[in-house]
Amino acid sequence: MDYSKGKTLTDYEKYIRTEELLSLQKSGDELACNDELTFQMIHQIAELHFKLMIQYIHLADECMKKNDVHEAAQQIDRVNMHLDHLPNVFDMVKVISPRDYHTIRLALGQGSGQDSPGFNEVLRLGPTLWEPFKALLDKRELTPLEVHKEPGEHEQLFRLMQGLIRFDENFQSFRHHHIQLVRRMIGLNTQSLKGIPAQALERGVKYEFYPELWQAICDLTDWTGSSYDTKPLE
């Protein structure tokens, strides 16, 4: 689809590089079926989301190491905005019939969503934010539980901590959403998951970036006494 053929490119087209961008998909006569364009573009869009998330994760890491808690929290908020949006991007795959989806999978060769470089880089980088965050706590002689006990006294740290645990939660939710998409389009009780057992996908959903932050929530529950010996209301 060459919308600009035969005309002078505008500055917008030059800056966004629309000619190059719109040439990155298969042409109409190369498509295995009409919806292969939908499949290809949705996954390209997802890779662009991941690229921005990776930039924000690196910036958050740098900010924490510079003791800039406020800006680090801002960058994690950006990561979470993308994770809020990504499930809706992949929901667009559902317009493809399962039969056509299999036609596209055959054209994909041995490729799989598990090979996504952006997804795998976020998966690798996510846990690396724990050490700079812990360093911020150690510098103030705090633990996650103590921040939970007095969130008003440690407002910026509390906001950053909540952003990190939301990042972890959102990424787990995204992985669960992907399993549901696989279940709907391919099925989980099949020998054709391209070498990736369904159980491996399910284990991935349970993987946590920040187990210490999840434990702190349990510790807070125990500290408040609300996990045992509660009294009935009168």
Image: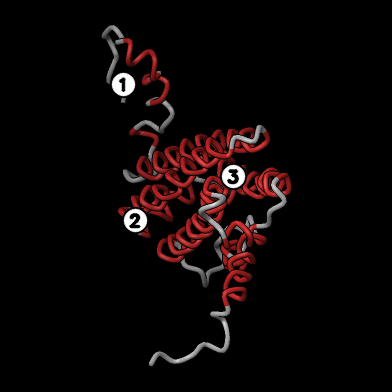
Residue sitting nearer the eye, 77 or 27: 77
- Find residue 67 and report its horizontal and vertical position in percent: 64, 36
Residue in view at x 57 percent, y 48 percent: 157
The picture places residue 76, in percent across and down from the top left corner, at 52, 43
Residue 175 visible somewhere in the drawing: yes
Can residue 196 be seen? no
Q: Is residue 91 left or right of residue 69?
A: left
- First in sequence, mark 2 or 1: give its number: 1
Would residue 181 appear left or right of 210 to someone viewing this image?
Answer: left
- Which label sits in the foreground, 2 or 3? 3
- Above or below, 17 relative to 60: above
Which numbered circle lies on residue 2? 1
Q: Nearer the viewer, residue 19 or 179?
A: 179
- What residue type is disc 2 on? Lys
> Local crowd at mark 3 within 10 Å, few (<14), some, or many (≥20)?
some
Return the residue at label 2: 94
Which quarter shows the C terminus? bottom left
**CB-based contact (under 8 Å), mark 1 and mark 3:** no
Q: Residue 133's x, y, as percent?
A: 66, 46
The earlier-in-sequence mark between 1 and 3 is 1
88 shown above or below 214: above
Q: Residue beneath label 3, please?
A: 122
Q: Helix, strand, or loop for circle 2?
A: helix
The reply, left or right, for residue 27 in relation to residue 224 is: left
Identity, as a three-letter code, of the amino acid under mark 3: Val
The figure's colour scheme reads: secondary structure
